[in-house]
Amino acid sequence: VLLRGWHTPALFADDVRYVPPPALGPTPINGRAAVLAFWRAIGGSPDITITNLSLEEAEPNRFVRTARLTHRNDDEALDYVIRQVTEVRGGRVVSQVNEQIGGG
């Protein structure tokens, strides 16, 4: 599955715990507003391609996937592979942890 565009902020809970891919910043971020501010601060990733490589675990409230992310702007491209663990409650992401496992 190939996805284009950056994160959909509406899917994050108000009190989400988000750990961005280390290529973008290793500091955990707490709260939807802070996640939005983070993405704005790094330029909002105007052109990001996400290619799902594998789905390791899929439960109603949790999924684990491996994905390749490529961010492009006019000057450069950043390409890396992550293992992403996402927990969901009430249809909202309450925790998302991204561990870089390749590239970057």
Image (cartoon, rainbow, N blue to C red):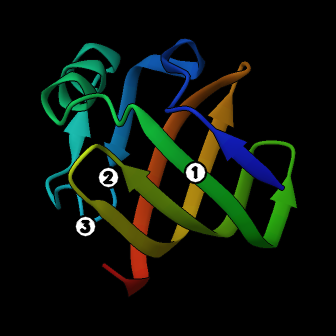
Coordinates of residue 48 in the picture (x, y in percent): 49, 45
State if disc 2 and disc 3 touch (CB < 8 Å): yes
Q: Is residue 33 above or below residue 30?
A: above
Coordinates of residue 46 in the picture (x, y in percent): 39, 31
Specify the quadrant that holds the N terminus.
bottom right
Q: Secondary structure at mark 2?
A: loop
Q: Which residue is mark 3?
A: 22
State if disc 3 and disc 1 touch (CB < 8 Å): no
Label at residue 82: none
Label at residue 20: 2
Q: Assess disc 1: are there few (<14), some (14-19) or many (≥20) residues with their C-alpha within 10 Å of its C-alpha.
A: some
Rounded to the nearest angstrom, the CA distance separating label 2 from label 1 is 16 Å
Q: Is residue 6 above or below residue 33?
A: below
| Left or right of residue 84: residue 71 | left
Residue furthest out toward the bottom: 102
Q: Secondary structure at mark 3?
A: loop
Label at residue 49: 1
Rounded to the nearest angstrom, the CA distance separating label 1 from label 3 is 17 Å
Residue furthest out toward the front: 74
Coordinates of residue 63 in the picture (x, y in percent): 73, 56
Coordinates of residue 55 in the picture (x, y in percent): 81, 69
Q: In the image, what residue occupies the spot 57% across and 60% down?
A: 85
| Left or right of residue 83: residue 25 | left
Task: Name which residue type carries label 2.
Answer: Pro
- Given residues 30 and 81, the one toward you in this image is 81
